[in-house]
Image (cartoon, rainbow, N blue to C red):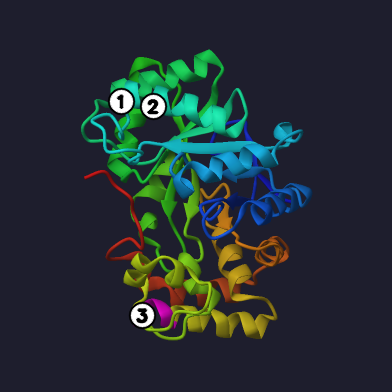
């Protein structure tokens, strides 16, 4: 396994991380536990979840799976998106974050979170309140590092400025949609992270499965795919993105690897990327994703992938999650 620094922090994370959005939803508990153990046995130490994944089931499953192995894991979770419809059921207020942290700790069966992330920018809470709360969590020992998710570049820079001015611990990472099918972070977020020492943690690195090559047309919904289990995913299935998936699959065939491994290997080599979180609903998917670590992409292949995906640097991000 390859390990990289998480931004400018001293924390080392596996180049391939495990995303757990499907645990308790598209993967049952037994399968999810098997995937977690397989990941740990393979050297993966970064496990990412959130308080809302599968209606909290993801955190609960991880808590069970890590019994006796907690010390092997850099455990990351998030809060801030909608947990309930109450007046304080979402956001980054001190009230909401403290409440959600305690509940996540109970579900995860741990007394600390290695990386606690704000799931999205909250325009209704002063940044100083959010960042002071996170600073207090670190001081208490319940949180070790803090990160952001779904922040625009200006929002992240403002947060870093507030932390520096007030003497708070800063964000060490940011999660963002980033893949061959979504290179929009390269316009502003990547240069910012390189300058400020913030590690990028891409989500949707396979564009929800489109970069695996399994989608052949916008109307195509393979059995068991995200498009079948989550009808809202249909909005991502446009001809341009599917054609990119076809071209990546063609190039992977020439190299003798899977499209998934090729897409992940390209992303691992991008500037500021610390770890790439990839989900799995069966152990075979994880095994395939792990092969990306052994891929040494020739310069010519990287150039071809850059050219194939160049237009995806512009326009709308593939995905972003915000409070309304």
Left or right of residue 53, residue 290 in this image: right
Q: Residue at x 68, y 53 (%)?
A: 30
Say which residue appears at 50% left-offset and 70% top-offset.
209
Q: Is residue 240 magenta?
A: yes
Residue at the image point whose x is 70% and y is 67% from the top: 284
**To which residue does mark 1 refer?**
93
- Give the mark nearer the N terminus: 1 vs 3: 1
Foreground tag (1 vs 3): 1
How packed mark 3 is, by other alpha carbons closer than 10 Å (few <14, some 14-19, many 20 or more), is few
Q: Is residue 269 visible?
A: no
Q: Secondary structure at mark 2?
A: helix
**Residue range (magenta):** 239-243
Quarter containing the C terminus: top left
> Position of 60 compared to 81: left or right?
right
Lower position in the chain sequence, tag 2 or tag 3:
2
Tell whether position 233 is magenta.
no
- The disc at residue 97 is 2
Neighbor class of circle 2 (other Cα within 10 Å; few <14, some 14-19, many 20+) is: many
> In this view of the protein, which residue sits in the foreground, 151 or 22?
22
As displayed, is residue 89 above or below residue 31? above
Q: Residue 261: image x %, image y %?
A: 63, 68
Choose top left, top right, bottom left or bottom right for residue 218: bottom left
Circles 1, 2 touching at the beta carbon (< 8 Å): yes
Relative height, residue 7 to residue 144 (above, below): below
Q: Which residue is mark 3?
A: 240
Report the Cα–Cα distance between label 1 and label 2: 6 Å
Residue 161 place in picture, x, y as percent: 33, 27
């Amino acid at each position: 396994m390859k390990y990289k620094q998480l931004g400018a922090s001293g924390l080392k994370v596996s180049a391939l991380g495990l995303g757990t959005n499907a645990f308790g939803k598209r993967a049952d508990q037994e399968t999810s536990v098997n995937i977690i153990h397989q990941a740990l046995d393979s050297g993966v130490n970064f496990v990412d979840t959130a308080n809302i994944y599968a209606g909290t089931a993801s955190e609960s499953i991880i808590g069970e799976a890590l019994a006796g192995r907690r010390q092997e894991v850099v455990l990351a979770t998030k809060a801030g998106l909608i947990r309930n419809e109450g007046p304080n059921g979402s956001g980054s207020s001190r009230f909401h974050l403290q409440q959600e942290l305690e509940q996540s700790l109970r579900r995860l069966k741990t007394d600390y979170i290695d990386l606690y992330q704000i799931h999205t920018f909250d325009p209704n809470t002063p940044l100083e309140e959010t960042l002071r709360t996170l600073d207090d969590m670190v001081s208490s020992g319940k949180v070790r590092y803090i990160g952001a998710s779904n922040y625009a570049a200006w929002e992240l820079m403002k947060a870093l400025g507030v932390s520096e001015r007030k003497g708070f611990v800063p964000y060490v990472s940011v999660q963002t949609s980033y893949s061959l099918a979504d290179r929009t972070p390269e316009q502003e977020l990547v240069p910012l992270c390189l300058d400020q020492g913030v590690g990028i943690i891409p989500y949707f690195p396979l564009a929800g499965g489109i970069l695996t090559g399994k989608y052949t047309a916008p109307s195509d919904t393979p059995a068991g795919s995200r498009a079948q289990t989550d009808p809202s995913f249909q909005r991502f299935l446009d001809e341009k993105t599917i054609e990119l998936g076809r071209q990546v699959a063609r190039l992977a065939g020439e190299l003798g690897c899977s499209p998934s491994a090729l897409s992940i290997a390209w992303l691992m080599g991008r500037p500021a990327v610390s770890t790439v979180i990839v989900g799995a609903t069966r152990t075979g998917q994880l095994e395939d994703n792990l092969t990306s670590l052994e891929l040494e992409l020739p310069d010519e292949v990287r150039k071809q992938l850059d050219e194939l995906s160049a237009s995806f640097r512009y326009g709308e991000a593939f995905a972003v999650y915000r409070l309304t």
